Each structure stands twice: as structure tokens, then as C-alpha cells.
């Protein structure tokens, strides 16, 4: 358990945090939310100890470890993927090196009876013992499990880190944090570097993780699936919700309504008091009452209404020009790179009005096929464009192709023609560029601003085939919702590459799953595809286990189970169910006691003496230990119940 106590930070003369306090419990799953610039990343850095606070402290119990993944980081390793990932276990790596050196030396010696030889044997034995105690034997299995889960193939393990993009190198950094198994994991926008499969694997890993997890993310589905608690940072304060992101949104609206009602009531009361003061200020007979009301105003604890940032992009794509029924046809499309063949002779067709999602692991050919369709890459095979097809393309690295020396206005003005020219400022205003912002040079824009400017360029030429490659990168949740709304109203044909499930939901009617140089088509949207894939994987598992199942059925028949054994089994089931019921009652009582203690720890100014002498922490840790034991017993009983059932 970590205590964040009375943290204060000033930024530009304004309080970023104003005496912020909360507790991070041992198995918390916390989503950290707030508008851009609210201080989410700063708070993660303070918890990790990278950045200090001007007031307050973060109390981390001795021996507890914290792992931290920043949004971006420079990676300059020359090691292979496997060796770099194994740096998560420096002691084990060092011991493996020492073991190899000792084995080499022992193999080269012939003085088997000498004291030096026996000393080397003893040293080797001690290292082996320590190596096994700290789990050295299972390290390589864990490395493979995590790296494969994050999308690496086994043949990637021996490739040098510099051969991979920065996104893939960040995956290795994620792997190192997960492998170290710190008591608290802090992740700042981890899904920026992952595809859908890797995101789902990470979700499962984090949900089952033994320690606490704190996330900053703009992926609503990821937050909903992982977190059970949401901490909102706003106006220098925090609000703690016992809910995932969707639950937090609903609860926040209720809080805002209540806050506004309280504010209006107070303002009404203030106006009444001010009217009384103004009316009787100069009447000597009312002097005492006037002074009393003046003091009332001075002592009044003013209610503040949270200033909500309602600014968001607003636009619609221009109507799509008419095109033929067949928009696109590809036959035997092949694409080779020096290292490997990415597309293995694929065939496909795109019909007018289709809305297609390209999904699959990174590196499987989604962006490659997008670039082939737009004419940016050479290929083998036949690609036939339909009648009057006009393509609008948003590349994954679109913002990097903007001229950094041009201003925002010039970027649009360069390509605007005809009737659009007088509307440039209006278009830019729709993407939150107004006033002096339009004279900013591209090189000083943030990642989100560059993305918005790149999307704005798409509006200048009406297209009937939109191809968007990861358009939601760097966009906040409100901007993503606006873009999705515009795409839902778009009347042309759409191909979109994305790993954001919430964004894709309801947006497409066909899914192309890229895998091993081919793709498999699924009818429906992203969640229909994910459900179909789950069923397919289960079917494959059933086929693989069919032989074993047949053998079991031949040797064990239901008819051979005796009546006495059935009765004995039923007695055992009743006994275990009763034990589970008693255990659940005990857990409920312990959780109630723990919540009371958490409340006391969350108000350190009321319990200073017990916090100072450590008795409150000891009582809380003892309570958590008992709760952990009961939870372990409950899990064991349930495992036994499932086995009996």
C-alpha cells in the first residue's frame, strides 16, 4: 500500500495539485483521467520518484517496488530482443554468466583432488542454489510468454533492437516491466504501441496481475476492461470513483449536477445577504445585523463550479462524388520486402458503400496494402480501380509529412482551391485553430494538433474512398467521438486501420484480419469479429484435444460410477459449499474493517498520532494479510468445488 499525502505542485503560478491525497491499495486497478495538462503524467512521475512535489509526500513502504512506462522514451540498445528483455533480471543474467565461466573453468582443470577444485565446486553449488531460489530456471519460459503475448514471433527474439520501429522497441520496455513484477505498475498510454491482439493480451495480464496498476489511456475499452477505480484530476483536486471509465462518466455527471445546484443555492444566498447589506448599510439601527452579515460573507466557504472544457473539433466530410459500383478489385497482390514477404498473393474486392476495418498484428501488411491501394508502393499482381474513384488518404505518420516551416494557415492555403479558399479560417476553426493559432508554425505544434491539421487537409478534396491509417493516434476521447460521428455520416466508401475497439464499434460492416501474409474476411463490426475469432480459437482447442477426450471416454464411463460414490460426492459438495459460505461472510467482515481503516488513512490530519507511531499502518496491514489469507482459502475452496462438480 502506497500513501499519496497532501501533494502540492504549482505550474505557471496556478496549482496543478492542491494538497492531493489518496491511497493506492495492493491490488487496485486505477484509471487516471483528466483533460490535457491536468497533471496525469506529472502525478505518475511523482509516485515513481522521478519528479518531486513542492509540498506533501509519497509514502512507499520499505521493499515495495514501482515500475513505470512513460509515453515516449529513447531506446538505443544494440542487443537482441531476447537479451534486452532479459535485462529485467540483472541478477539472474549475472549469475548465468558466472555459471558458464565456472563450468568452463571446471571443464578445463584436471586437479580433481585439489582444494582449489573443491572450492570451485562449492562456489558453483552455492550459485546454483541461489539461481534456483530466485526462479532462474523459469526465466526463459516467462520471457517467451510475455514477448509472444506482446506480438513478437520466436524468430524475432534473435533480431537486434535497432531493426525494429520505436513502437516495437517500446513493447520490449513494457515486457521488462511486466517481467520484473513490481508491486505497482504505472503505465502512461501503453496502447499507443500495441495492436488489438496485444492489447487484449495485456488486458488479461493486468486484470490477473498480483500487484496494483495505474493507467493513463485514451482507449475507453482498455480502461473499462482493466480498471475498477477511476481518479479524476481537475482544478488541482482529485475525485475518486469506485468504477471503471464508463461508470465514472455517469457518476461525474451526477456530481457536476449536484455541484452546480449547490453553487446556485449559495449564489442565491449571497445575493440575499448583499441586498440586505446594501439596503440597511447606512441605518444605525441595523448596524449590528449588517456587520453580522458581512462576517457571514467573509467566513463563507465558496463553492467552485468546475470549468469544463467544451472545446472540440466539429466538422463533416464533404459529400462523396459519384463512383461505380465496384470501387476496387485486387488479384494475386504480392509485396516483398528485403527481410520477408508481407503479402502472399491476396484477392479482394471493395463495393461502393463498404466500410472495412483492417485489423491484425503490427507488421502483417495492413499499412502496406493501404499504401498499395493509394499508389505509394510498388507490388506484383493486378489492382483495378473502379469508375471515377477519388481517394482521400490519411497515413499513420501523416503529421510527419507536414512542412515544419509552414504556418497552420499556409499548410491549408497551399492546397485550397476555388470556393474553399474563403472558408479556410472557418475550416481551421472547426479543428480548434483560431486567432494567433493559425500563424503557428507546424514544428511547434503538439502531436494532437498535427493530427487535427492533417485531418483538416482531408476536407479540401472531396473523396469517395477514404483510407485512414490509425487516425485516432494523439486524439483525446472527445475528438475521437467527433471524428467517429463525422465518419458515420460520411456517404462514401471507407477503409480504416485501427486498434481502437471502441472507435471501430459500429463504424464498419466488414473486417479484414491480416495474418501470415493473407487475410480472413469477417462480416460485421469489430466486436462481431472478436467473438467469431474467440469461437474459432475454442474450436481449434477442441479439435486438438479430441484424441485425448476419446481415450478418456473409452476408459471412464458414466455407467461405472457407483451409487455410493455419487452420494459421497454430493456430501463433499455440500461440505465445501458450507465452507465457502462461512469464508465469504468472514471476507465481508474483513473488507468492512479494511474500508474503515482506509478511510482513516485517507484523513491523516485526524489520526496523526496513530500514523506517526505506525499503529494504524500495522493494523491495516494485519487486516489486509488476514483478508489475503481468506481470499486464498476462498479460491482454494472454489477450485475444489469445481473439481468435485
Image (cartoon, helix red, strand yellow):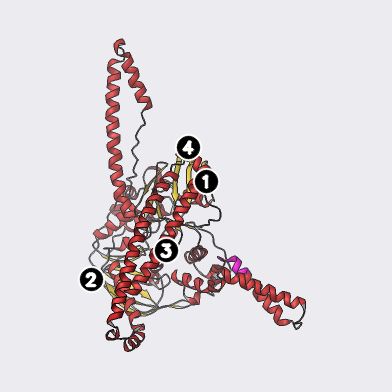
Whether 88 is among the magenta residues is: yes
User: Distance of mark 3 from mark 1, alpha carbons?
Assistant: 27 Å
Report the front residue among 1 and 595. Answer: 595
Q: CA distance from mark 1 to mark 4?
A: 36 Å
Left or right of 424 on screen, residue 216 = right
Residue 630 appearing in the image: yes
Q: CA distance from mark 4 to mark 2?
A: 60 Å
Count residues near mark 1 (Cα–Cα under 10 Å), then give few for <14, some for 14-19, many for 20+: few
x, y (%) of residue 524?
Answer: 25, 69
Q: Which residue is mark 3?
A: 632
Q: Which residues are magenta?
A: 87-94
Of the image marks 1 and 4, the number of the one nearer the N terminus? 4
Q: Which mark is residue 330?
A: none
What residue is pinned by disc 4? 13
Q: Earlier in the sequence, mark 4 or mark 3?
A: 4
What element does badge 1 sit on?
loop
The residue depicted at 63 percent of the width and 68 percent of the height is 94
Q: Which labelled disc corresponds to residue 324? A: 2
Amino acid at each position: 500500500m502506497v500513501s499519496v499525502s497532501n501533494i502540492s505542485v504549482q505550474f505557471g503560478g496556478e496549482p496543478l495539485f492542491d494538497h492531493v491525497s489518496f491511497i493506492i491499495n495492493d491490488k487496485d486497478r486505477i484509471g487516471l483521467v483528466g483533460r490535457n495538462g491536468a497533471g496525469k503524467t506529472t502525478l505518475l512521475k511523482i509516485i515513481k520518484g522521478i519528479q518531486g512535489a513542492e509540498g506533501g509526500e509519497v509514502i512507499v513502504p520499505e521493499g515495495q517496488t514501482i515500475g513505470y512506462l512513460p509515453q515516449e522514451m529513447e531506446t538505443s540498445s544494440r542487443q537482441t530482443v531476447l537479451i534486452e528483455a532479459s535485462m529485467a533480471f540483472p541478477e539472474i543474467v549475472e549469475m548465468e554468466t558466472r555459471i558458464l565461466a565456472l563450468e568452463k573453468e571446471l571443464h578445463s582443470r584436471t586437479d580433481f583432488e585439489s582444494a582449489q577444485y573443491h572450492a570451485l565446486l562449492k562456489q558453483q553449488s552455492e550459485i546454483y542454489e541461489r539461481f534456483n531460489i530466485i526462479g532462474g530456471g523459469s526465466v526463459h519460459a516467462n520471457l517467451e510468454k510475455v514477448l509472444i503475448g506482446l506480438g513478437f514471433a520466436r524468430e524475432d527474439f534473435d533480431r537486434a533492437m535497432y531493426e525494429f520501429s520505436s513502437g516495437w522497441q517500446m513493447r520490449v520496455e513494457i515486457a521488462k516491466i511486466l517481467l520484473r513484477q513490481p508491486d505497482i505498475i504505472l503505465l502512461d498510454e501503453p496502447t499507443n504501441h500495441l495492436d488489438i491482439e496485444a492489447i487484449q493480451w495485456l488486458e488479461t495480464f493486468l486484470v490477473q496481475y498480483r500487484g496494483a496498476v495505474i493507467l493513463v489511456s485514451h482507449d475507453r475499452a482498455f480502461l473499462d476492461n482493466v480498471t475498477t477505480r477511476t481518479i479524476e484530476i481537475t482544478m488541482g483536486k482529485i475525485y475518486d470513483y469506485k468504477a471503471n471509465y464508463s461508470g465514472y462518466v455517469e457518476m461525474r455527471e451526477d456530481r457536476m449536477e449536484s455541484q452546480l445546484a449547490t453553487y446556485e443555492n449559495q449564489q442565491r444566498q449571497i445575493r440575499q445577504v448583499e441586498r440586505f447589506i446594501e439596503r440597511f448599510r447606512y441605518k444605525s439601527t441595523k448596524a449590528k445585523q449588517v456587520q453580522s452579515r458581512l462576517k457571514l460573507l467573509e467566513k463563507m466557504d465558496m463553492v467552485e463550479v468546475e470549468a469544463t472544457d467544451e472545446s472540440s473539433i466539429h466538422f463533416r466530410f464533404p459529400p462523396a462524388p459519384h463512383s461505380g459500383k465496384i470501387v476496387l478489385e485486387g488479384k494475386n497482390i504480392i509485396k516483398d520486402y528485403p527481410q520477408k514477404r508481407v503479402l502472399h498473393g491476396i484477392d479482394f474486392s471493395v463495393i461502393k458503400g463498404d466500410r472495412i476495418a483492417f485489423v491484425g498484428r503490427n507488421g502483417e501488411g495492413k499499412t502496406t496494402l493501404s499504401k498499395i491501394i493509394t499508389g505509394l508502393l510498388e507490388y506484383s499482381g493486378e489492382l483495378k480501380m473502379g469508375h471515377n474513384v477519388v481517394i482521400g488518404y490519411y497515413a499513420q505518420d501523416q503529421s510527419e509529412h507536414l512542412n515544419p516551416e509552414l504556418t497552420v494557415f499556409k499548410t491549408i492555403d497551399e492546397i485550397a482551391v476555388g470556393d474553399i479558399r474563403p472558408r479556410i479560417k472557418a475550416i481551421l476553426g472547426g479543428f480548434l485553430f483560431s486567432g494567433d493559432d493559425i500563424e503557428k508554425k507546424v514544428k511547434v505544434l503538439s502531436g494532437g494538433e498535427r493530427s487535427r491539421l492533417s485531418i483538416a487537409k482531408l476536407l479540401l478534396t472531396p473523396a469517395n474512398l477514404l483510407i485512414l491509417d490509425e487516425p485516432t493516434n494523439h486524439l483525446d476521447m472527445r475528438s475521437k467521438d467527433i471524428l467517429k460521428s463525422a465518419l458515420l455520416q460520411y456517404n462514401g466508401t471507407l477503409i480504416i486501420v485501427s486498434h481502437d475497439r471502441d472507435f471501430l464499434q459500429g463504424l464498419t460492416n466488414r473486417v479484414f484480419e491480416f495474418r501470415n501474409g493473407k487475410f480472413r474476411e469477417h462480416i460485421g463490426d469489430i466486436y462481431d469479429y472478436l467473438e467469431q475469432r474467440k469461437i474459432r480459437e475454442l474450436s481449434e482447442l477442441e479439435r486438438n484435444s479430441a484424441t485425448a477426450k476419446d481415450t478418456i471416454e473409452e476408459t471412464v464411463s458414466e455407467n461405472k460410477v457407483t451409487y455410493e460414490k455419487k452420494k459421497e460426492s454430493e456430501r463433499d459438495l455440500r461440505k465445501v459449499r458450507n465452507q465457502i459460505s462461512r469464508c465469504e461472510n468472514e471476507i465481508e467482515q474483513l473488507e468492512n474493517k479494511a474500508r474503515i481503516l482506509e478511510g482513516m488513512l485517507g484523513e491523516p490530519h485526524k489520526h496523526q498520532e496513530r500514523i506517526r507511531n505506525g499503529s494504524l499502518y500495522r493494523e491495516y496491514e494485519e487486516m489486509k494479510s488476514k483478508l489475503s489469507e481468506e481470499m486464498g482459502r476462498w479460491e482454494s475452496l472454489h477450485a475444489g468445488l469445481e473439481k468435485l462438480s
